[in-house]
Image: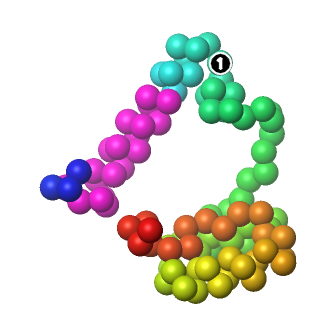
Amino acid sequence: MNFLGHAGASMIALAGLDTACWHLAARAARVPLHRYLGGAATRVETYASSGLWLDRTVDADQAWPESFAIRAGREFEVLDIFWLEEPVFCTDL
């Protein structure tokens, strides 16, 4: 993927292909996809994306530098935050 870059249409196409492969594997095993991936619950908590807070979740939308993300994550622990999504840019790992 280096010649196309790690963004845009190439990643969108790969995401769809990845999802289709998991779906086909689950169908071949004759189980629902969530069970194939190890899920046991029939209901799960959901959240709103794009920077919204909802029921102990935070979506930073890849907006924070690493040092701030680490500091914020530690502070969120005392608030019992359940999920911190995309605190840093996807290639800043």
Would you say residue 10 sits in the magenta stretch? Answer: yes
Task: Give coordinates of residue 74: x percent, y percent.
Answer: 72, 79
Residue drawn at x 48%, y 22% as measured from the top left: 24
Check the picture and name the quadrant holding the C terminus. Answer: bottom left
Q: Going 56% across and 73% down the picture, which residue do you hit?
A: 87
Q: Which quadrant of the view contains residue 92? A: bottom left
Which picture quadrant has residue 16? top left
Residue 70 percent coordinates (x, y): 61, 79
Q: Residue 47's spot in the image, x, y percent?
A: 71, 59
- Towards the viewer: 40 or 70: 70
Is residue 42 positioned above or below 58 on the image?
Answer: above
Q: Taking 31 as reference, is 16 above or below it? A: below
Number of callouts? 1
Q: Which residue is tagged 1? A: 31
Instruction: Answer above or below: position of 76 versus 32.
Output: below
Q: Residue at x 73, y 67 (%)?
A: 57
Q: Which residues are magenta?
A: 4-22
> The residue tagged with tag 1: helix, strand or loop?
loop
Q: Nearer the viewer, residue 10 or 64?
A: 64
Q: Is residue 15 magenta?
A: yes
Residue 73 falls left or right of residue 14? right
Measured from the top left, where is residue 68 in percent x and y? Answer: 58, 86
Q: Main secondary structure of the magenta part?
A: helix
Residue 48 visible in the snapshot:
yes
Query: Residue drawn at (77%, 63%), measured in percent from left and top?
Result: 82
Judge the density around disc 1: few (<14), some (14-19), many (≥20) Cα neighbours within 10 Å.
few
Q: Residue 71 occupies which quadrant of the picture?
A: bottom right
Q: Is residue 54 visible?
A: no
Which amino acid type is shown beneath numbered disc 1?
Val
